Image (cartoon, rainbow, N blue to C red):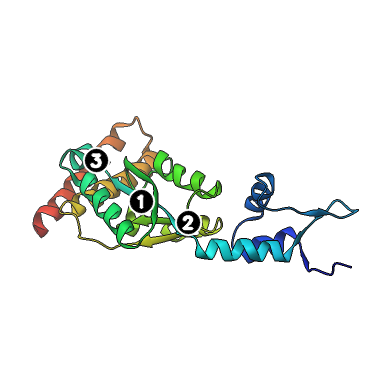
Amino acid sequence: MNHEQMLSTGQVAERLGMTVRTVYRWEKAGRLHPVRLPTGQRRFPAGEVDALLHTKARAVPRCVVYARVSSGKQAEAGNLDRQRERLVAAAAERRYKLVATVTERASGLNEKRKGLHRLFHMAASDEIDVVLVEFKDRLARFGFAYVVEALAAHGVRVEVLDGPVATDATQELVQDMLAIIAVFAARLYGRRSQRFRHKVQEAAQELDDEVMGDA
């Protein structure tokens, strides 16, 4: 009689470091072969799961590099291209398998970035193992830890290079701060009001004076 240990879907997900949804996708793709109990529940042979775990551990990590700038001016100056080139070189040095490069021009406060959504889609589809970025704020100006946790739920880790600081990093931060001010001013005064426009212009001038004073 076969007394091989059988694992539940949750146990498989925990052992392989993935979500239950990914376990179902692996089953559908034919990478896992569960046994159905009379109750309809799935049970997976532990030997098959361990074999997949060992294969996954030996495999070359699949990497996507993510580069972002906030403005068209930065992109035109070549900052985006240089950022991407440094990340691609770093992936090669770490002997990762580069499967995609994702670049975009958008504020770090923008939650609807197409590039960021693509990362989540690739993670959920089990296409990548590593996301490589130059700085934490390339992924998110705020909430970086939440992005890391969301990717980790799919077994994907984030690696940060902490490369050279861009010369226009201060200006980019100012732009993001203005975006925050604009959001709150709109809520307080209404986006179409004259007072809203005045508050934003006033804040922009104060921030500009601070930057020039530090220069």
Q: Position of residue 42 (x, y in %)?
A: 79, 55
Q: Residue at x 69, y 61 (%)?
A: 48
Please, what is the three-letter code of the amino acid marked with disc 2?
A: Asp
Q: Residue tagged by mark 1?
A: 65
- Location of residue 30 with respect to 151 vertically, above or below: above
Where 2 falls versus 79 (above or below)?
A: below
| Identity, as a three-letter code, of the amino acid under mark 1 | Val
Q: How far apart are the alpha carbons under marks 1 and 3?
A: 19 Å
Question: Can you identify the residue that label 3 sits on?
Answer: 71
- Say if residue 37 shows up in the picture: yes
Tag 3 or tag 1, which sits nearer the N-term? 1
Where does the image place residue 196, in percent across and percent down from the top left?
Answer: 31, 37
Quarter residue 75 falls in: top left
Q: Which mark is residue 129?
A: 2
Disc assigned to residue 75: none
Q: Badge 1 local density, few (<14 within 10 Å), some, or many (20+)?
A: many
As measured in the structure, the alpha-carbon distance from the residue carrying label 3 to the one carrying label 2 is 29 Å
Nearest the camera: 53 or 130?
53
> Residue at 21% of width from left, 45% of height from top?
204
Q: Secondary structure at mark 2?
A: loop
Residue 115: x and y in percent read 40, 42
Q: Quarter holding the N terminus?
A: bottom right
Q: Secondary structure at mark 1?
A: strand
Between 175 and 151, the one lying in front of the other is 151
- Secondary element at image label 3: loop
